[in-house]
Amino acid sequence: MAGSKKRVVITGMGVVSPLGGSLGEFWRGLVEGKSAASAIESFDTASYRAKNGCEVKDFDFARLAGCPVPPNMGRASQMAVAAAGLALADAALPLEEVDRTRVGVSLGTTCGEIQVLERVADNEVGHQAGCEIDPCWWLSVYPACSIPASVAHWFGLCGPNVMIPNACAAGNYSIAYACDLIKLGRADIMLAGGADPISRVAFTGFARLGSLAPERCQPFDKNRRGIMIGEGAGVLVLEELRHARARGARIYAEIGGCGVTGDGYHMTAPRGDGEGIARAMELALREAGLAPRDVDYINAHGTGTVVNDKVETLAIKKTFGRWAQDLAISSTKSMIGHTLGAASAIEAAACTLAIVNRELPPTINYETPDPFCDLDYVPNVSRRRDIDVALNNAVAFAGANSCVVIERVQ
């Protein structure tokens, strides 16, 4: 990585996804092209045209943590704590031997503990006798800041603690912020990522926008019909390179650069020319000291909506020019759905595993090429390939664009 005295590396990863509760299950599901889409079980979808989502159906916090769920921990916090625990174990990081005032948490979300608010609303509307909810309880559990706070409390981490509720780009933003803290010398280690539970509120909102795919997600396909709502959490252990080497840590990859931009255009639609997304990729590459021809793979935002996939393709062409045709691009949302604020954190883990395992996850459900989306989207079947540089793209409502460069450590 050029132009920086401090380098940030990934030494651990934890993923709670609709494909399984371990990093191995997650990666196997991706390379096998497994779809996690099925009928939603956590709330009644009878009044909706779309019925499917990607839920984490086997999630058991008590089993993972070895104790009952604390009363002040909602589902988003449970998944975040579980993913953080998996990441710390993967990093073989002995917390009792490090300065915990130098270990922080930076997480992103879209809906936060929205299930808590839904429960309160149901209670108020239903007026169920004997089911009154203590306002002190839900006011302490519902705010989004409770998610990184739960992680910090659970592991006794006293470094910087921040929640970035930047919608579907929140995971990448949280990774970028964590990298900045390490480079500025304000932390040695950061747990960075995102978490979001499946939500009736989000499902309803996307349904009203006409953005929900009825049965499956088909990114970049001509007949794509929308997103598939998912849930999960992804946490990376980010560490200053010298700190990681001093403790003999295994190093997966390096965060080469990050780019964040805003469209300043519309609250839900991206700019039609892809300028904001392109600029985020360009900034990330510039920070990494890389040229477009150095990139091997892009994990696309790839939501499966008509507009988003077309605009992201335009942005890639704008950034890479003639090199765009040589890129491998895939959308793992075709398999695990759109996990909202957790998406780009989970996808950062996918990029890292692609580099480590030299294999590209596919875009499944790809059947009919779209003349407006005419790049290599690794259709349906994973592909062996040496990958030295991967880009992780994520965009959000209100035009929040982000890109993280993940590189093989040289």
Image (cartoon, rainbow, N blue to C red):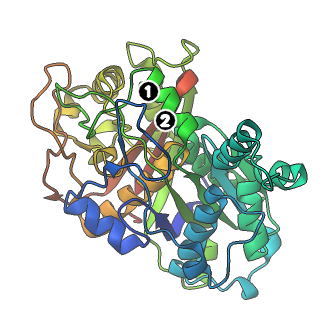
Q: Is residue 104 visible?
A: yes
Front-most of residues 323 and 394: 394
Q: Residue at x 71, y 66 (%)?
A: 151
| Label 2 to label 1: alpha-carbon separation | 6 Å
* Disc 2 residue crowd, few under 14, some 14–19, many 20+, Cα 10 Å: many
Front-most of residues 326 and 83: 83
Position of 187 compared to 136: left or right?
A: left
Q: Is residue 103 visible?
A: no
Q: Residue at x 74, y 73 (%)?
A: 154
Q: Position of residue 371 (x, y in %)?
A: 13, 20
> Within the image, what quadrant is residue 28 found in?
bottom left
Q: Is residue 330 above or below residue 251?
A: above
Q: Is residue 38 above or below residue 96?
A: above
Q: Is residue 239 above or below residue 64?
A: above
Q: Disc 1 on helix, strand or loop? A: helix
Q: Position of residue 61 (x, y in %)?
A: 58, 73
Position of 158 compared to 353: left or right?
A: right
* Disc 1 residue crowd, few under 14, some 14–19, many 20+, Cα 10 Å: some
Q: Amino acid at mark 1?
A: Ala
Q: Is residue 207 above or below residue 182?
A: above
Label 2 with label 1: CB-CB less than 8 Å: yes
For disc 1, the marked residue is 207
Q: Residue at x 66, y 63 (%)?
A: 190
Q: Residue at x 40, y 57 (%)?
A: 407
Q: Amino acid at mark 2?
A: Phe
Q: Which mark is residue 203?
A: 2
